[in-house]
Image (spheres, rainbow, N blue to C red):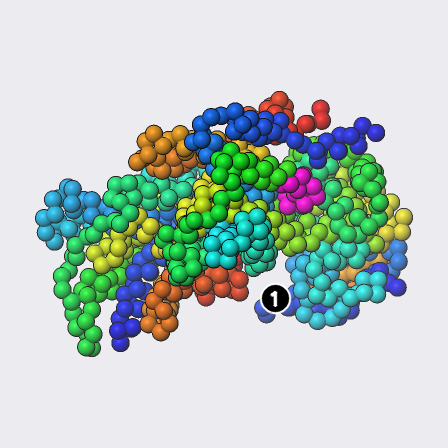
Amino acid sequence: MKPLEIDNLSKNFGGLQALNSVSFSVLSGEIVGIIGPNGAGKTTLFNCISGFLPFDSGAVTLFGRSVKGRKPYQIVNLGLTRTWQLVKPFFGMKVMEAMMIPSFCHRAAKRHDSKKKVRESVLRILEEMGLGEKIWEDVDKLNQGELRLLDIARALVTFPKILLLDEPFSGLSQKEIENITTVARRLNAQGLPVVIIEHRLRELMKLIEKVVVISFGRKIAEGTPEAIVKNENVIKAYLGERRSRIGLA
Amino acid sequence: MEILIIGAVRGALYSLIAVGFVLIFSVGGILNLAHGTYYMLGAYLTYIYYTFIFGAGGIGLLTLSALLGVLSVGVIACLVYYVLLRPYIHSLTYVMVMTLALALFVSEIMSLLFGVSGTSVPSFVEGSLSIGGIKMINQQLILIPITALILPSLWYFLKRTRIGQSIDAVSQERTGAILMGVSVETATLITTGLSAALAALAGALIAPVSSVVPEMWLFPLIKAFAIAILGGMGSLVGSIIASFIIGYAEVLSSFMINEQLTELVALVVIILVLIFKPSGIMGYKVR
Amino acid sequence: MNLHKETRLLYKNQSPFGWAMIVAMALFALLSENIFYVEVIKIAAIYAIFAMSWDILTGYTHEVNFGFAFFIGGAGYLSGILNSIFSFSPLIAIPLAALAAGASGIFIGYLTLRLKGPYFSMATLAFASILFKLSFIFYEITGGEEGISGLDVFSDDPTKDFFVAWAVMLAVFIVLTLYAQSKHGIILKAIRADEDATQSAGINTAYYKIEAFAISGFMAGVGGGVFAHSQMHIGPTMLSGYISIIVVLLAMIGGMGSIVGPLFGAIALTILNEYLRVVEEYRIVIYTGILILLIYIAPEGLFNLKFVRKSRILTFILLGERRPL
């Protein structure tokens, strides 16, 4: 059973065809990147997959189950969690408090038989993210990099079977990006399929094994990072003169 | 026929009230729950000026009282905005709670001064007119020409004068307006005064034929809100159209069903619109 | 691990000040010889019930409910009608009325799910105003302007009557404090911070919002019923905008989002209101004026003032929050 199968997904916004019959799959343990010029429809894709936007036609299947018409929280409880491009932390709370929230969802609650175990789980995840020292800080006081890690931690507390990261590198320094890359790699090595939307191609290509390219709502290419950077259509669509800057080293 | 005219009078009255309400919301982001109070004060102040300052001396002085009343309300509104609202203008919750509290406060003051049964104001224009066989009170009828004069003047002000255009700009695209050098502060201040004055004018005009009581602030406020969401919170034209829709709906329901249900019309409209089509007729997105 | 004890501390906050107030009220009622004063703190206790019930919804979601009169007056009238027309004892009428209030909380909560900010607030105001108008339209049942009189009281002894109100206040305080600190309260705070993020944490936000509305309505309904029977009368004031706004002001001045803040606000200010009876004619005006002044000075409420929140001692005494060093 494939973790995620997108089949001819289409979404129309009052005349603007944001997504046009997009199809691709994510296989077990894969780490996939979704790239494309600005406004191509990548975030719309994520929003449709995660239930925040209803889609017009096509199918999204999560481990064999259709997610059409389901509310976002239901999809999370089926095992698919996403992070946000514009980070959405829980301002006004302490880190530890904020992290308890995902632990209240059905999926996480089912896994633990005692409150103590829940807390231990959350603490462990926070420590793995490198936020162990900050659990009593106000969320408002964290910097951008830490907020990103917190968002990922929030996703992990729901025990996802597949993780979607929406532009996790944006606004971060090199070091912070490396941090997140390490985290993503580790999670994937443990068997979690990961799908990442990104613009920072150099850093992304080092991390992923498969690329899906979206332009103007359509999938225009799919393949390995090496193949994609050489793909005529992709280059035409958006790499342009940046091609020389996409090394693989 | 009667319905046509009464409905038109109502629509005119409501549009004077609603336009101000929508304007200050789109310009200043202020949901002024004291708007009904400005309407009420228009009526009460007319009475106060006329009775206590001018010693009830005839129609000329009555008109003067009304004008003074309208101006005073404009000034009061500006003061309220400047002193009480500006410091916390970013918090919509505060603005709503404070304006509602003020509405209550003024209502209690009026109750204290003039009692629960209120007062009465004499008519500006005596007598009645016979239109198509129906007898209509002149005092009600003048609302139509006055509104017909004021609304286009307002449009002219907003679209053709410099000050008006800056207000218009702020209401449509705030950030853009700031970047163009428009002073949002000034625009909001002027709009506050203007909005309150319009409501006060409505109150002053309707005072002779309506009951001037301390509770007269609540339902005009509710209706203004109903009209605003029906017409779309940002659209002046929408609110004028909606004013007439609600005006006629009320008159129709009063004739056809039950007089007591008229007041419920606006309430039901609010509930229905908010639940089914929050963006209204000419709309604005709720989010 | 230390961390466990610390995390548990997040959720077991009891406000010493709040408890002190509650105990003080009980002691006062037992020791005081003055019936009038006992009446006053009885009313104060009931307003505290209203304020705390309001807080659990608005204080935690930050969507301002302007139509609380719906639950207060609605349940008050229902209980009054059950009592006067159908001869139900208050002990049965009040819970029934409160359940009806809670059920309407579910209904209104569901209808207003998608509304935010001013739209939510005006919708709640509209619902309350509809009920207000209906009470005049159906004046045969509701008594119109005059309301319903001659309701059964709990006891002829004013002190016992007070303790009924006090016991309800105590129960509401305990239940709401526990609720606010449980996952339900935390989820409400999260919804207020960001509903999308809460959804993407796997939480059914609609459920928790409606649940809070229902509990808020139920508690207010109990308060409304207790009020009606303790005054032996229910009138349209309890359905009016007046009571809705007063409850909002009492809770906000105390400090929204803390349960104990509104408890304090309601008690202190209601006692002030009664104290102002010395200038009865001007009382309402002065009272409302003071409330406006207080909201202007402390818009977030007295318990939420910056200097309170910054001080470890005050935060502990007033809110019961212990902050890990």
Q: Which residue is nearer to you in this view: B177 or B71?
A: B71
Q: Residues within 10 Å of mark 1 (few under 14, many from 20)?
A: few
Residue drawn where x is 43% and y is 49% of the image: C150
Report the magenta residues as a range: C175-190
Disc 1 marks a residue whose amino acid type is Phe
Q: Which residue is nearer to you in this view: C195 or C89?
A: C89
Q: Main secondary structure of the magenta part?
A: helix
Residue at the far top: name it: C313
- Label 1: which secondary element: strand
Residue drawn where x is 45% and y is 63% of the image: B268
Is residue A191 shown above or below B75? Answer: below
Residue B61 locus on image (x, y percent): 12, 49
Magenta span includes C181: yes
Q: Is residue B172 visible?
A: no
Residue C5 locus on image (x, y percent): 78, 30
Residue drawn where x is 70% and y is 71% of the image: A57
Q: Which residue is nearer to you in this view: A223 or C312?
A: C312
Residue at the far front: name it: C156
Q: Is residue B208 left or right of residue A17?
A: left
Residue drawn where x is 54% and y is 27% of the image: C30
Magenta span includes C320: no
State the residue position of label 1: A13
| Rendered-image quadrant of the C terminus of chain C | top right
Say how many tags the image has.
Answer: 1
| Rendered-image quadrant of the N terminus of chain C | top right
| Displayed quadrant of residue B11 | bottom left
Q: Is residue C267 left or right of residue B224?
A: right
Is residue B170 shown above or below B270? Answer: above
Q: Which residue is nearer to you in this view: C318 or A94?
A: C318
